Amino acid sequence: MFPPIDVQTLLLVSTLVLALLGAMFLVSWVQNREETALAHWGASLLAAAPAVTLLALRGQVADWASIGVANAMVLSAYGLFLSGVLAFDRGESRWALVLPVLCVGAWSIANFLPGFHDAFIWQIGRAHV
């Protein structure tokens, strides 16, 4: 029988794995600068690593950090990953970074709207596991 592993430990390991994978993608991109998708994917993983850390610290740090900043970083990570897919598929990354900027901008603006934090449907990050 395996000993129980708590969620905090799993999130710490996830953070380390994301950071290592992101660094590996960036090293691969440095070796082949023509493939810009590698840079997008590396940046995506490196943006996700501190986001997971902030999500793991929910209840121990301020809500603006564990919800607002963490979710903005998750959105930027997803946007960067998708921009990497577009850069890989089309071979051009000129407009691919617009999506992550729009995602983070929309989330940041929504955080200033009155009542946004009170609406449960928008608060997936607030749910306690």
Image (cartoon, grey):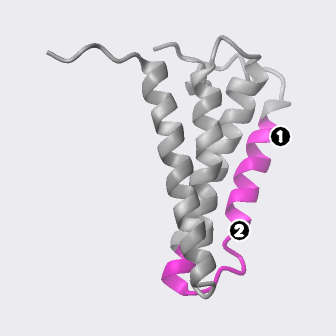
For mark 1, what is the residue? 109
Query: What residue span does the magenta drawing correspond to?
Result: 86-110
Secondary structure type for disc 1: helix
Residue 121 lies, with reference to residue 44, above or below; the image says above
Residue 13 lies, with reference to residue 26, above or below; the image says above
For mark 2, what is the residue? 97
Residue at image position (45%, 14%) is: 129
Residue at image position (60%, 27%) is: 55
**Residue situated in front as seen by the camera: 58 or 32:** 32
The percent coordinates of residue 57 (x first, y second) are 63, 20
- Work out whether residue 24 can be spotted: yes
Q: Nearer the viewer, mark 2 or mark 1?
A: 2
- Work out whether residue 83 can be spotted: no
Residue 21 horizontal side relative to residue 60, left or right: left
Overall secondary structure of the magenta section: helix
Q: Amino acid at mark 2?
A: Leu
Q: Amino acid at mark 1?
A: Ile
Secondary structure type for disc 2: loop
**Residue situated in front as seen by the camera: 100 or 15:** 15
User: Which tag, 2 or 1, sits closer to the chain's start?
Assistant: 2
The percent coordinates of residue 32 (x first, y second) are 57, 84
